[in-house]
Every structure is written in C-alpha cells, then in structure tokens.
Amino acid sequence: MKHGIKGLARKDVTSRYFVSWFFSMDDWLDAGATPDDFDYGRLIHDEKLNNYAYGFYIDNNIDGIIKLSLACNEVFIDMLFVNPDKQNWGIGTELMSYAIDKFGNRYDMSLNVLGLNDGGIRFYDRFGFKKIKPFSHYEWGTGAIRRCYTMKRDKKPKEIMESTRPRRII
C-alpha cells in the first residue's frame, strides 16, 4: 500500500472517489452542502493565494484532507477531514503533523471545532491546541445553532515541536 501527502489539485477533489466519501459526512449533510453547489476552488492548493490544501493519498486515492489559510502571520486550519472508512488509521495525525512541521515553528495556528466534538478537541489538544474562545455558529442548512470553540496553538521552535510530537500510526 503506497501512501503520501501532496498538494490538492482540482482533478483530485472532483474525483468520484473523493466526492463519494467527502459528501457523505455529517458535517456536509447537516449544512445542506451537495457536490453540485460546493466551491471546489476552496480545496485547491495555491500558495500565491496563501491557500494551502493537502491530501493524504493511499494508492492514488484521497483519504484525508487538511486545508489551511495564512493571514496576518497566523495559520488558520479551515478543514481536516478523513474518509470515514479510514478513520483511526493515523491519517489525521499524519496530516496535522505535516501542517505543524510546515508552519508550526513560524506561525501561531488556530482552528474552530464543534463543542460537542470531544474526540476532535482531544485530538487537537494532543498537538498543543488550547480552547481560547467559545462562540455560537448558525448552520444555514438546518437552522441549528451550535456551540463551537476557537482553539489556538502558539508557534514553537522546531526542537520543542519534536519532543511533543504525537506518535504516527501509518
């Protein structure tokens, strides 16, 4: 089984394989998003636009993505999704480790997480993210108001990052 991480291109994020698992996830179903109305440009890696999008590939199929934006000397993690059939394989850990290796010693990093997502909060905590601010999010697809948290990780020198790195599974 060959696996690796690389920047995402349009052909990758519009592949039948990716679309089938990506839009079956509750996040998109709850928000009312469909493959027909989704802005795939949001997932394209384009460093000129400070848009960093990486996919985790297993045998040439995308089974995880991480999307980051750089603004005002901070990296914001917009998305981290893993194919539901491949969760607990270490793909999320690989993608997060990759992002931190690439940006974590130069920039503070932040993200938003659903308040009910205890597993996600624990996952991000392993990488040094801490809850800093609660907020409410209105979900236009369902009309639900969800409690969320902004989590932040301060930049760390490379030698400190290495000593606190979670174990990779794959």
Image: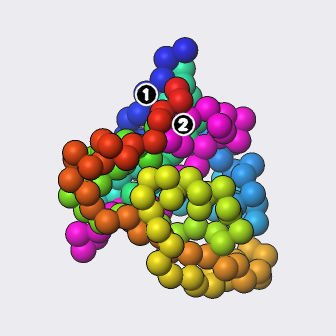
Which image quadrant: the N terminus?
top right
Q: Position of residue 137 (x, y in %)?
A: 63, 81
| Among the two numbered marks 1 and 2 on one chain, the one whose residue lies closer to the N terminus | 1
Determine the residue positioned at 66% across, 72% down. Answer: 115
Q: Is residue 83 magenta?
A: yes
Q: Nearer the viewer, mark 1 or mark 2?
A: 2
* For residue 18, above or below residue 106: above
Q: Which residues are magenta?
A: 69-93
| 17 or 37, nearer to the observer | 17
Q: State the CA–CA distance, disc 1 to disc 2.
A: 10 Å
State left or right for residue 27 relative to residue 109: right
**Residue placed under numbered mark 2 in the picture:** 91
Q: Is residue 143 above or below residue 158?
A: below
Q: Is residue 155 above or below residue 66?
A: below
| Spot occupied by residue 156 in the image (x, y as percentages of width and height) | 26, 57
Q: Camera-side residue: 122 or 7? A: 122
Left of 128 or right of it: where is 114? right
Q: Is residue 40 visible?
A: no
Confirm whether residue 148 shows in the render.
yes
Quadrant in the picture for residue 163: top left
Q: Is residue 93 above or below residue 26?
A: above
Q: Secondary structure at mark 2?
A: helix
Q: Is residue 157 magenta-colored?
A: no
Q: Residue furthest top?
A: 1
The crowding category of the residue bearing disc 1, from other C-alpha atoms within 10 Å (few below 14, some 14 to 19, many at least 20), is: some
Position in image of residue 96 (x %, y %): 44, 47
Hey, what amino acid is under mark 2? Ile
Q: Name which residue type carries label 1.
A: Gly
Residue under the image location 41 percent in, 69 percent down: 152
Q: Residue at x 59, y 62 (%)?
A: 121
